[in-house]
Amino acid sequence: MEGRPFSDISYERFLSEDKLMGSKCKKCGVLSVPPRSICIKCYGSEMGWVEMKGKGKLAAFTCIAIGPPFMIKEGYDRKHPYVSGVVELEEGVKVVARIEGVDGSKPETIRIGTPLKVEFLHRGEGENSTTFLAFRPS
Amino acid sequence: MRGPRKLGRGVAVVGAGMSRFGMFSDKDSKYLFAEAFHEMLSTVDKGIDPEDIDALYLGNFTNDFFIHQGHWGPIISDLLGLTPKPATRTEGACASSALAFREGVFAIASGFYDVVLVGGVEEMSKRSTEEVTQGLAMAASPYEVRAGFTFPGVFGAIATAYFARYGASREHLMNVTIKSHDNARLNPKAQFNVSIRDIMNQRIEKAKSKGGPIPAWRDEKEFLRDPGANPVVAWPMHLYDCCPISDGASCVLLVAEKIARSFTDKPLYVAGIGQGSGKGLHAKEDLTYFEATRYAAKEAYELSGLKPEDIQIAEVHDCFSIAEILHIEDLGFFRPGEGYKAVKEGLTRLDGSKPINTSGGLKCKGHPVGATGTGQLVEIWKQLRGEAGGRQVPIKDLRVGATQSLGGTGGTCTLTILERR
């Protein structure tokens, strides 16, 4: 784990292994999710990987009726909107993610502050496989 | 930030023009830019010989994607007969031509050039809505795209955070939309130069002629609440919260202050310029403001010696209705959490104390991405010179106007302040 570069590619690979990982500056302790290879507080380059507990709360959200092609392919459309959101993790950092287990066609039922837990959505196979970071109400 | 910035020498705007904005199946980027250029030439009171233009700075976001053609600097230079003068393209997503303007100002302020053409162009309507959405998403962060965010989605999420913090609601966003349409009704260059009331009447007439059920909207808000008339795009962003897909071009002519009067007796001076950069949605400390706009504003105010209250009129980047509310707070016109109240009270209307987006804004004038920054300046040019026709604001001694642009999800923001002396 320690040998992986602190890149978006590593971040995505961890997601495919059902891990939400961030980088922690060994000098000043600043945590970044997704990882950064430069600490933007002390400009140190010595980082360590840390796994997030995967718990947080909903900070902002949207129910998207007109999505990009890869979401349309999953069956989402104007009649079946999906939900994307900003999640504030217990560790104090925020991530953007799909929000599962809520009804995108009933936005009034979705509440900011709702406690959430992480979920990893695996799509496609082999070289075309992708994992999307998601959260659902806990 | 170190001490106040300053320009090496003064810079003035002496001409401004734009094409009509809209969706044109028979007009391409070159045609549209020529339209803007011709209008600009006609606005230079004492005339300009295009041979005297030293350089071109051109904003374009992604015609590469929209029409599979890049390298727009020399294409436009060739179009205008400016070759072999230098032509440089700037890219800052939706703020692309705001950056072209800034580079033009620097080029003159440094003493290198005396006469510079700056402008922007974008041709978006040849693609489907889904494809345009995908193209625009290239200016978002990769994490946002992975999470399914579209541009309306990003601003929808920002709206939910703003609502939760300050107690605003969709009803308040409707006030922005209604105002934008009222202003655009008076702008013949606008893509949608109709009021919401006009649209309602058109729909009612259509229903009558078709013999279908006649809609019974009591007022504009009831129309906007009707999901049939105003469907959701990315909740709480509905169709009428979103700027359209547009084609268009715009440009302004910049000259050194010392020669400005040889072009016109009514030049507008560049009092302040500012630019900032911002983090992606996940890394923002706070979702209810744009750090890049606040930074750009600080820079422009310091350079000009002006304060928010000195800005009499402004065009702000209302790509989505919620954005207008955030911008008028970030620029210091209203305190955080007070912007939506100011709009509700009518302060930002054409006849209000702080008219915002008299052109109809991106929402109604149109948003051909790369053309928007200098397009906003065209409106301020007209207003400060008293040439805005039916939408001329009734402010006595109107001297100071500003334009604010936002690129991506707040990644690039600018503020430009123009002054009539």
Image (tube, rainbow, N blue to C red):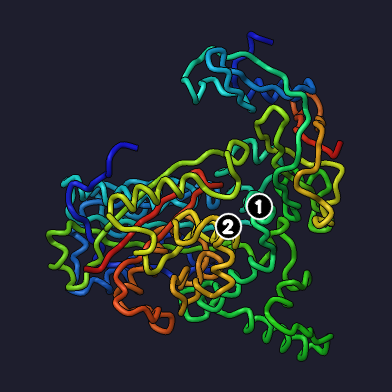
Q: Quadrant of residue B198?
A: bottom right
Q: Earlier in the sequence, mark 1 or mark 2?
A: 1
Seen at 56% across and 74% down, the residue is B345
Residue with the mark numbered 2: B337
Q: Position of residue B174 (x, y in %)?
A: 64, 70
Seen at 24% across and 55% down, the residue is B116
Left or right: residue B38 versus residue A56 is: left
Q: Which residue is at the front of the view, A13 or A129?
A: A13
Q: Are marks 1 and 2 in contact (CB under 8 Å)?
A: yes
Label 1 lies in what chain? B
Q: Position of residue B80 (x, y in %)?
A: 30, 60
The answer to whether residue B167 is visible is: yes
Residue B146 — which label?
none
Q: Quadrant of the C terminus of chain B?
A: bottom left
Q: Position of residue B18 (x, y in %)?
A: 39, 68
Q: Which residue is at the front of the view, B207 or A84?
A: A84
Left or right: residue A78 versus residue B125 is: right
Could you say whether the residue bearing mark 1 is in a helix, strand or loop?
helix
Residue B110 lies, with reference to residue B319, above or below; the image says: above
Left or right: residue A97 versus residue B340 is: right
Seen at 76% across and 30% down, the residue is A131
What is the three-letter code of the residue carrying label 1? Arg
Label 2 lies in what chain? B
Residue B114 lies, with reference to residue A126, above or below; the image says: below
Q: Residues within 10 Å of mark 1 (few under 14, many from 20)?
A: few
Number of numbered discs on residues? 2
Could you say whether the residue bearing mark 2 is in a helix, strand or loop?
loop
Seen at 54% across and 49% down, the residue is B289
Residue with the mark numbered 1: B165
What is the three-letter code of the residue carrying label 2? Gly
